[in-house]
Amino acid sequence: MGELRILSEQTVKRCMGEAIDASFEVCAEAYRYYGQVGSVLSEPSSLYLQLPSDKPKKCRLKGAHFGDIGIAGFRLASPGSYFTWVVNSQSGQPEGLVAENWLHRRRTAVTGALTLRWLRPDLRVITLIGAGKIGFECAIALGHAFPDASIILGCRDEGRGELFRDSLPWSVSSRMNIQAIEPAVRSSEAVLTITKASTAFIQGDWLRDRAIALSMGGVPEFDFTTWQRSQHLILDDLDYALKQGDLHHWVKSNGLDIDQIQARTTALIGEVALNPEKYQSICSGVTLAVIQGMAVCDVAMAGLALERATALNVGRVIDLDSC
């Protein structure tokens, strides 16, 4: 069966912490592969298992292949614990098990920043709403993708916002200001949300005429007027978007149906990755982008971590034939 390399959280951060350029490139390559091949995800794209525990808890499994670099695999998510199982895309033989609690935050952040850069490379003012662990990585990714842009942190609690800003690298915190959510949305060309909200808190009427609403959370964030105002929809995976997040909530609560979603869809993110200039021209009005994370990017990031770990000779290697 060969060898399996296992990477802990600490090892993943050692290999990938400074590799922001490489993270952007491998996620961009994964999206272009998705655009070229089309069917790269497992069927179904996301599988859930509800655990028989006292409190509602579930596990999730998402799979994909990334043939251009010869790997495939599954992202395994259980409460508080994330791993990506990587196999050879030709033989199916296991290659690695990669801890992903931090790595999926980096992946989420990079894919959001890539989406904005492909659609509006000249953004000057971006609002980030979400001051958690993923929000931290989003701030870094936005700062990397848009080195000349101002970043607004939209939040309800200014004190918490200041603590969040102070935790960021100076290159990002020095050009971040803090505003209440409504004025932050109204003054921005793009709004990225990654929160744990229980109800929608952004009104579509607050968005500027050519704004991008980038919905990344698995909860309701933008209200239904955002859908009504949007002229273009960019998706990563419709099947997953119907299970959680804004589209899921609008279908459940506002009568939105799949036919309406498909009619409004301008492009999948893989198509945008292949020809961003085309969609920069097409997406001239309010654009809604629902980018919640694809397993092909998880596999790509895990593969990169394994590649770098192999070069550094780190991680634990297990001989599957003799253990």
Image (cartoon, rainbow, N blue to C red):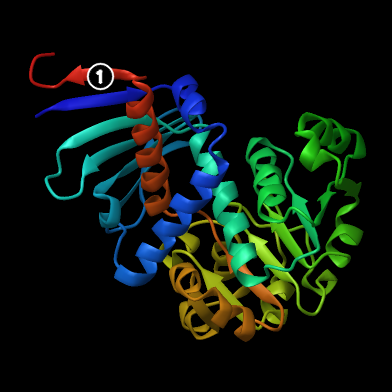
Tell me the kind of residue under disc 1: Val
Can you tell which quarter of the image residue 100 is in? Answer: top left
Residues 60 and 254: in front is 60
Q: Residue at x 47, y 77 (%)?
A: 258
Q: Residue furthest top?
A: 323
Q: Position of residue 234 (x, y in %)?
A: 55, 72
The residue identified by callout 1 is 317
Image quarter (top left, top right, bottom left or bottom right) of the N terminus:
top left
**What is the secondary structure assignment of the residue under circle 1?**
strand
Does residue 9 lie above or below 84 as drawn?
above
- Does the image show residue 154? yes
**Pick the front one: 189 or 235:** 189
* The image quarter in which residue 224 lies: bottom right
**Residue at point 47% right, 28% down?**
15
**Which of the 4 image quarters holds residue 83?**
top left
Q: Could you say where residue 266 lies in the image, as x and y percent from the top left?
A: 53, 81
Q: Residue at x 78, y 40 (%)?
A: 171
